[in-house]
Amino acid sequence: SQTIHQWPATLVQPVGSPLSLECTVEGTSNPNLYWYRQAAGRGLQLLFYSVGIGQISSEVPQNLSASRPQDRQFILSSKKLLLSDSGFYLCAWSRGQGETQYFGPGTRLLVL
Amino acid sequence: AQTVTQSQPEMSVQEAETVTLSCTYDTSESDYYLFWYKQPPSRQMILVIRQEAYKQQNATENRFSVNFQKAAKSFSLKISDSQLGDAAMYFCAYAVRFGAGTRLTVKP
């Protein structure tokens, strides 16, 4: 069976500090991978998606970046965090475009 | 542009009763999937039900069913025999586009 992991679960970071959130998928190969951000009580905003190693598409211009160094690893990064980067970050995978997405447990990020 | 709209920010239902959550979407595609996801207080997103657009038959999963109206681009979720554990945020989704969500409260 397939599983998806995200870490850390919770992160408190000062403004201007770097960020690295990691997501890994097990039990499948060549998945589509996604990073979403969810503000409190709101819907999901797609940040990045990837259809293969090294292939990253960005939805929203911002100070975040994503990388996919391995087939089942997806990393969300920032060189300098802003207060507005606070939120709940979800990683997801799917077998193909437009298909069912399976979500990780999420990371709560608080930037102070 | 692909958009998903949920017009009910909050809904409430009595335990054991039936509730319907509404969703409309916009697309120019003819073949696609639509989804309802549930997000309980733990914030873990869970797939509730999926509908394939080329299928005329509405999808059902136990107490959950959909009313899919392709021409109207409407995709509502019906929860029958509501249980306390159904209390959550519900999101309608088309591909990577999600609605704003409906918070469902279940009253004992």
Image: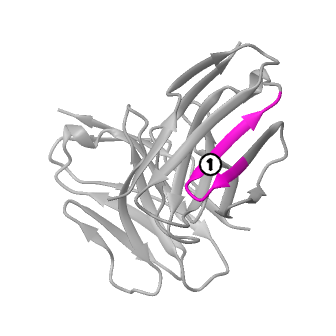
Eyeballing the image, is B41 above or below A69?
Answer: above
Given the current orientation, which residue lies at the most extreme front position? A70
| Figure colour scheme | one colour
The residue under the point 55% across, 43% down is A23
Most frequent secondary structure within the magenta stretch: strand
Query: Dividing the image into 4 quarters, which one contains the C terminus of chain A?
Result: top right
In percent of width and height, residue B91 lies at 47, 51
Q: Is A35 placed left or right of B33 in the picture?
A: right
Eyeballing the image, is B81 above or below B42?
Answer: below
The magenta-colored residue range is A67-79
Front residue of this view, candidates B85 and B21: B85
Eyeballing the image, is B95 above or below A40?
Answer: below
Q: Is B29 placed left or right of A26 in the picture?
A: right
Asked if the stretch drawn in magenta spans residue B53, the answer is: no
The residue under the point 33% across, 83% down is B57
In percent of width and height, residue B93 lies at 52, 60
Which residue is under mark 1? A74
Q: Secondary structure at mark 1?
A: strand
In percent of width and height, residue B89 lies at 42, 41
**Disc 1 sits on a residue from what chain?**
A
